[in-house]
Amino acid sequence: MYLTKLTLNLRSAHARRDVGDAYEMHRTLVRAFVSTPDAAPPRFLWRLESTSKEGTSPAVLVQSQAQADWTILERQPNYLQQAVETKTVDLARLVQLDRPYRFRLLANPTVCRKGKRLALLNPEEQTTWMERQAANHGFDIQALKIRPHELLTSSSGGKAPICVQRVCFDGLLSVGNKADFEKALLDGIGPAKAFGCGLLSVAPC
């Protein structure tokens, strides 16, 4: 598995557009995974990291099983603030049963009612959603912090705007089922993955 950090340069109009529109960001990232514009990209996950300090450059984390060709972004004038940082992650070594991990998940917690997907806005509902995801993906939550939700509006390529409710979950977890947890890391959790949701990041405590 490959994990890449892209630090963007906001002096670039292209970078500012991507930071402001998840649809455009996804389109830009896809270009690093395909050889021709009409080719289907492999599965990848990404997340725009929030910047709390003024003047801090925004960063995008990209996780994939396929190796990307980031030279396509390096050739974009002023798009990147610094060199692309990529490392390989050995899941077999990273994931250990009953070991505590810090985690972060930017997700789109929803529920289907009467054929419609509805956003969960209540913190209690969001907590229940996260606990259900943990049970379904082989881990137990030891501590959980929920950041205020954020409504993302995307242009969706000039079509009707798409609205996605994004919630950031931080905390501690332990792994109960190694296979299910590894699958969650590879495939992501929840809907709206093309819009920067679903990437579960973990680090041993």
Image: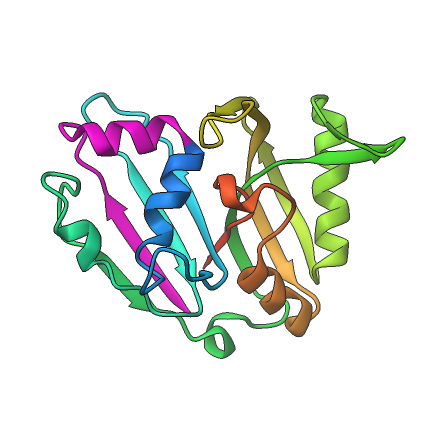
Q: Is residue 9 magenta?
A: yes
Q: Position of residue 176 (x, y in %)?
A: 70, 66
In the image, residue 32 sits, relative to residue 77, either above or below, namely below
- Residue 76, image quadrant: top left
Whether residue 14 is visible here, answered yes or no, is yes
Q: Is residue 143 magenta?
A: no
- Residue 180, image quadrant: bottom right
In the image, residue 156 sits, relative to residue 92, either above or below, namely above
174 horizontally vs 31: left or right: right
Nearer to me, 164 or 204? 164
The residue lying at 17 percent from left, 40 percent from top is 79
The residue lying at 45 percent from left, 32 percent from top is 157
Q: Position of residue 9 (x, y in %)?
A: 17, 35
The residue lying at 51 percent from left, 45 percent from top is 194
Q: Position of residue 92 (x, y in %)?
A: 51, 78
The extreme bottom residue here reads 92
The magenta stretch is 1-21
Nearer to me, 7 or 134? 7
Q: Position of residue 112 (x, y in %)?
A: 82, 35
In the image, residue 73 sits, relative to residue 20, either above or below, namely below
